[in-house]
Amino acid sequence: MYKPPPSPPRVLSFDLDDTLWPVGSVILKAERELYDWLHARYPTAVEGHSIESMRQLRAGVAARFPEQGHDLTFLRRRALAEQLLAAGHAEAAADEAFEVFFAARNRVECYPDVLPALERLRSRYRLFALSNGNADLDRCGLAGLFEGHVTARTAGVAKPDARIFAALLRAAGVSAHEVLHVGDDPHADVIGAERAGLRSIWINREARAWPSGFAAPIRTVCSLAELD
């Protein structure tokens, strides 16, 4: 039986970290800035600590608060509060410390293809961001390119949970078949979107192998410049 081709999407949704910019180096730099700030401002809080041990503190918070595991802001701030309290400092210092990290975390540098592609695509589609991370589009200087931003923190769940994709549909006021999601993570972005009824594109900038045992993505690109 003949099936007509799918209609063009009305909305393009984009993952952020490692889709629009490389995030590993950004997080490491932010953690170093935070550590250096703590060492200068609250030195007793980092006695016996390293960046790695502070990561372990955050992992411990995630283990104790699994219901908050999707909320990276909560996890980091809670770990900082516990670290500072253990050193005899007021919990309010955690707000200062988190702001140091967060400011650096949002100093991102987009891949070269990203800004030209988004400027071009926004003339034809409504653009939304859909992210598990806690990047702030205003601070990143990209808010003007997107109509909205749905995060794991605001949705209460992280990709690939279908509920975060449902939150995107509510925010955009569209049906699943009207959205095309673009992201770098095979499970969180591509498989998650497909299982939630959305179409998806895998952006594979590093020629990675697709995970075995799952149907291949409908389309793969290595750059946003390939989107039309």
Image: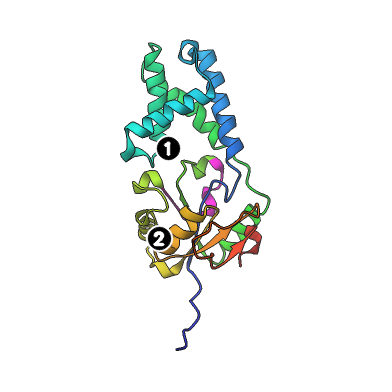
**Whole-percent x and y of residue 158?**
40, 48
Quadrant in which the C terminus is drawn: bottom right
Please give the name of the residue rendered at 37% of the width and 39% of the height, measured from the top-left corner: 69
Look at discs 2 and 1 and give the one toward the viewer.
1
Please give the name of the residue rendered at 56% of the width and 59% of the height, measured from the top-left corner: 202
Q: Is residue 115 above or below residue 31?
A: below
Farthest residue toward the bottom?
Answer: 1
Give amino acid for label 2: Ala
Farthest residue toward the right?
Answer: 112
User: Magenta segment, which residues?
Assistant: 140-151
Asked if residue 128 can be seen in this view, the reply is no
Badge 1 local density, few (<14 within 10 Å), some, or many (20+)?
some
Mark 2 vs 1: CB contact within 8 A? no
Numbered disc total:
2
Q: Which residue is mark 2?
A: 172
**Whole-percent x and y of residue 81?**
38, 22
Q: Secondary structure at mark 2?
A: helix
Badge 2 local density, few (<14 within 10 Å), some, or many (20+)?
many
Q: Is residue 167 above or below residue 136?
A: below
Give amino acid for label 1: Leu
Q: Nearer the viewer, residue 65 or 177?
A: 65
Residue 176: image quadrant is bottom left
Q: Secondary structure at mark 1?
A: helix
**Whole-percent x and y of residue 173?**
37, 63
Q: Is residue 223 above or below residue 59?
A: below
Magenta-colored stretch includes residue 145: yes
Please give the name of the residue rendered at 49% of the width and 42% of the height, measured from the top-left corner: 136
Left or right of 34, for residue 91: left
Left or right of 118, for residue 157: left
Q: Which residue is mark 1?
A: 72
